[in-house]
Image (cartoon, rainbow, N blue to C red):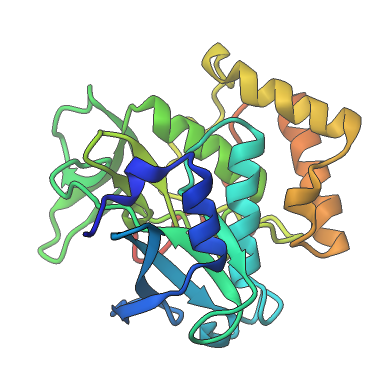
Amino acid sequence: MISSATKWIGSDALVQALSNGELEVEGLLAGASNGTLRCFVEVAPDCRVRCVYKPVAGERPLWDFPEGTLSMREVASYEMSQSLGLGVVPPTVWRTAGPAGPGMCQVWIDEIADVQLVAVITGGEDLSDWHHVFDGTDESGAVVSLVHAKDSALQKIALLDSVINNADRKGGHLLVDEDQRVWAIDHGVSFSAEDKLRTVLWGWAGESIPDGLREPVTRLQAMLDNGLPESVTRWLAKDEVVALENRIDQLLVAGIFPLPSPGWPAIPWPVF
């Protein structure tokens, strides 16, 4: 029997299965920039769930990130989400072994495709339900606008991206499951020591971090006072850990969502 993986989130059985269970490869995800396999793993007798397996061997080298580290950054991003109490990244673990060697394994989210969190709309449309990001033109020359929903879960993700320095927050990396829970995936290009925040979630840029995010902000302060969690830092280089501390400090001092960097493209391309 195949079960929805989200029903198992929070269970020790799921973590054990992702970490050590035998992966049955279902297929290769077409269009992924790195080798990404969708697999089945057994979490209970006669009950399997889907997961995503990204082996280090399938990573495409990048000029601005150390080779063979993208899967580790995925794990670090999940651990930071958990450490801040955000719970917006699907359970993600490191596997020392798998069909293609070591890499990360993450719960597969069954997406409800008709829920739009990020959209391109015709210029001049009502923006009361949207945060405006920027305007552009389509292939016919008509004005269009990139927008994202005014959603508290997206705001949590925007905060997480600010902390982990996410260089590639596309609209397609934001998923809604059958319980209407919002998830963020694909964090392989995060935690750079250089300022690389690139996202479609600029709707809160320059605004004060609201009281609704008081708990993660309090946890960020505790990290500065008591040290960053080893569950995050073990996957990062020393200069990346120092940069992470500095980002947290700057975020807390400013008390606002960061603005785009003048020295780095603000929007990922393509946006979906």
Relative height, residue 191 to residue 29 (above, below)? above
Q: Is residue 1 left or right of residue 228?
A: left
Which of the image's four quarters has the C terminus?
bottom left
Q: Quick one: 229 or 258, which is closer to the camera?
A: 229
Counting labels gives: 0
Q: Nearer the viewer, residue 50 or 149?
A: 50
Residue in the picture at 60% in, 39% down: 82
Q: Residue furthest left?
A: 140
**How far from the left and from the top, in percent, is residue 212?**
52, 15
Seen from this angle, which residue lies furthest front?
45
Q: In the image, residue 63 lies at what x, y percent?
A: 64, 81
Res. 271 visible in picture: yes
Residue 245 horizontal side relative to residue 119, left or right:
right
Q: Residue at x 61, y 58 (%)?
A: 75
Up/down of 132 relative to 120, above or below: above
Q: Residue at x 32, y 35 (%)?
A: 181
| Residue 195 image offset from top left, x and y in percent | 69, 55
Q: From this viewpoint, is residue 186 visible?
A: no
Q: On the picture, is 229 further left or further right than 9?
A: right
Q: Residue at x 82, y 41 (%)?
A: 228
The quadrant in which the N terminus is found is: bottom left
Query: Can you tell which quarter of the image residue 45 is in?
Result: bottom left
Across and down, in percent, residue 18 comes to 50, 61
Residue 139 is left or right of residue 82, and the answer is left
Seen in the picture, residue 28 relative to 265 is either above or below; the reply is below
